[in-house]
Image (tube, helix red, strand yellow):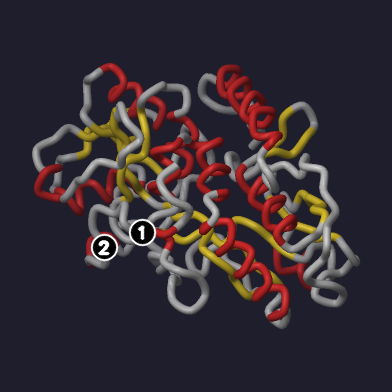
Amino acid sequence: MKLWRMTRAAALVAVLLAASLALGGCAGATGSKQQALTPTVDVPAVHAAGVLKVGVDSAHAPYAGTSKGKIVGIDVDVASALAEQLGLKVEIVDMVGKSPDDLLADGSVDVVMDVEQSGSNVTQGKTVGPYLLSGPALFAKTRSNEVPELDIQTLSGTKISAQKDSLSAWTVDELIGKGTASSVATLADALKAVNDGASTYAAADAIVGSYLAIEYQDISCVKILGTPIGVYCAVAADNGTLADALTGALRELRDNGELVVIISKWLGPVSAQVVISSQAVVAQNTDANAAAGTGSGAGSEAGAASAAPAGDPGQIDTGEDLPDPSNAGGTG
């Protein structure tokens, strides 16, 4: 799906193009900073000396999409920043319609973005991250850059709009109580209900919902519902050298605050804190929230179900691989 094929498309594209230009001076985010690169990894960990070839899916906005013939998105900016940390130039490869594992195996790419360790978007490669957390989440009006405190008890009795038969609607009813979710036709309608004051919260996929919410000045993702779904990058299963290098690079992006700057560009400052922080979770590890899925496009959520959606919760790995995501670059 191209970036402009969304609800209120023209406004979103204008915001995205402005954001891309605005971040042009941020080191690593767009590759525009002129400086000599000193590679820290070489062939055979990468297939071409001095270059990190990164596969992104241009049909999965806002991770990646096309605007005026150029591939842009969260994954493009994160990949560019990772490459710079490794002293490499970045080469973006569109993997839409192709198998990430095939591209890794034949050397077309060194890294693929936007994969899960389990669930619907998995790879057989070695995963690094997560660099984002996704899954059903709550959206509310926020007038500061602070993530509000919420728990199941405080949510009981509130009106939460959600797209009919979506994974988010199901999760709300299972975690908070049957009948809590107020059904609307589309994800955009759920956000509008919050904006108009008809609902206190909207429920939607954390990443896709945050992307759509940029249309509204003060609506943000404020909590993830249930167990977060980690979003990872991956390399070939036998490429431990590159996996280790990327782990260190991602850790540096988190520690120096660059990751939160990149994510804030696309999703807003409050939403960015939530989707890189395991602290921003309403509830975890209950039988009711053992459903997985992520939005496949803006305006409509994937994983729609009237009964319990099938799948695995995609447990996030924050042990030896990377520090806890709650340390991901401060509060921006």
Pointer 1: what residue?
A: 278
> What is the distance, in whole Å, between disc 2 and disc 1 at their CAs?
10 Å
Nearest to the observer: residue 322 or residue 201: 322
Dot 2 amino acid type = Gln
Nearest to the observer: residue 66 or residue 249: 249
Q: Are marks 2 and 1 in contact (CB under 8 Å)?
A: no
Pointer 2: what residue?
A: 284
Q: Quadrant of the N terminus?
A: top right
Q: Secondary structure at mark 1?
A: loop
Q: Residue at x 40, y 45 (%)?
A: 331
Name the front one of labels 2 and 1. Answer: 1
Q: Residue at x 69, y 28 (%)?
A: 21
Dot 1 amino acid type = Ser
Q: Secondary structure at mark 2?
A: loop
Q: Is residue 257 above or below residue 66?
A: below
Q: Residue at x 67, y 31 (%)?
A: 20
Measuring from the top left, give residue 182's x and y in whole percent. 22, 33
Query: Callout 1: 10 Å neighbours few (<14), some, many (20+)?
Result: many
| Left or right placement of residue 283 versus residue 25 in this view | left
Q: Residue at x 72, y 73 (%)?
A: 242
| Left or right placement of residue 8 versus residue 140 in this view | right
Q: Quadrant of residue 30?
A: top right
Measuring from the top left, give residue 4's x and y in whole percent. 63, 26
Q: Earlier in the sequence, mark 2 or mark 1?
A: 1
Q: Is residue 114 above or below residue 299?
A: below
Measuring from the top left, give residue 214's x and y in whole percent. 47, 28
Query: Callout 2: 10 Å neighbours few (<14), some, many (20+)?
Result: some
Q: Quadrant of the C terminus?
A: top left
